[in-house]
Image (cartoon, rainbow, N blue to C red):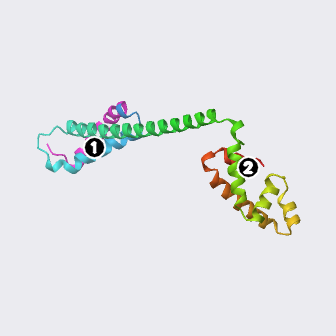
Amino acid sequence: MTFNLSDFNQFFEEYRQRFVHFVVTYVHDEAVAEDIVIESMMYYWENKGRLAADTNIAAYVLTAIKHKCIDYLRHRRLQQEVSDEISRLHAWELSSRILSLEDFEPDEIFTHEIQEIVDKALSALPEQTRRIFVMSRYENKSHKEIAESLGISTKGVEFHISKATKVLRLALKDYLPAALLFLHLH
């Protein structure tokens, strides 16, 4: 039996809601179910010329629906697996940060070894940069006070402090986050 457009419209109206109800039981989403049913009906309409005259149209459309549901559910499963993996990696990363903090000993921030690295890095700086950094971090002078004291602009002070901070970050890279704490505490 071949359908003309009028027959197809009647079939569509008769079966659409039944098929949607069937699909919802699997995909749990009314809008997705509607899309799957309409796509399956369109699939039949586009391929009706290739089908045998005695094809059970409802069974044919339901088979298309079944395969579209399977594809949809497999895709959802893959999305869930990816989401689970991302969640697992995030949980691992959070655990790593927790362990890192649990292992962190504040008493070790300013150990002799770190102080030696800082002293060595500071001694390698140009005199003006070192003097400005020491005034800022060790003598707790403001940028304005340093600028007035040395007869330079506050932008110049900021430049030298930034330069010293970069050198110290590089020298203390193995001691992060302690180095960042050190550089921002003073």
Name the kind of residue labelled 2 in the image.
His
Please state the extent of the stretch shown in magenta in the rendering. 1-25
Label ID, residue 40: 1
Magenta region includes residue 10: yes
Q: Main secondary structure of the magenta part?
A: helix
Q: Residues within 10 Å of mark 2 (few under 14, many from 20)?
A: few
Please tell me which residue lies in front, 176 or 47. Answer: 176
Marks 2 and 1, the one that precedes in the sequence: 1
Residue where numbered disc 2 is placed: 184
Residue extending furthest toward the top: 25
Q: Quadrant of residue 132?
A: bottom right
Q: Quadrant of residue 2?
A: top left
Q: Position of residue 106 (x, y in %)?
A: 70, 37
Vertical arrangement, residue 86 with respect to residue 26, above or below: below
Name the kind of residue labelled 1 in the image.
Ser
Residue at (35, 41) in percent of width and height: 75
Magenta region includes residue 180: no
Residue at (37, 39) in percent of width and height: 78
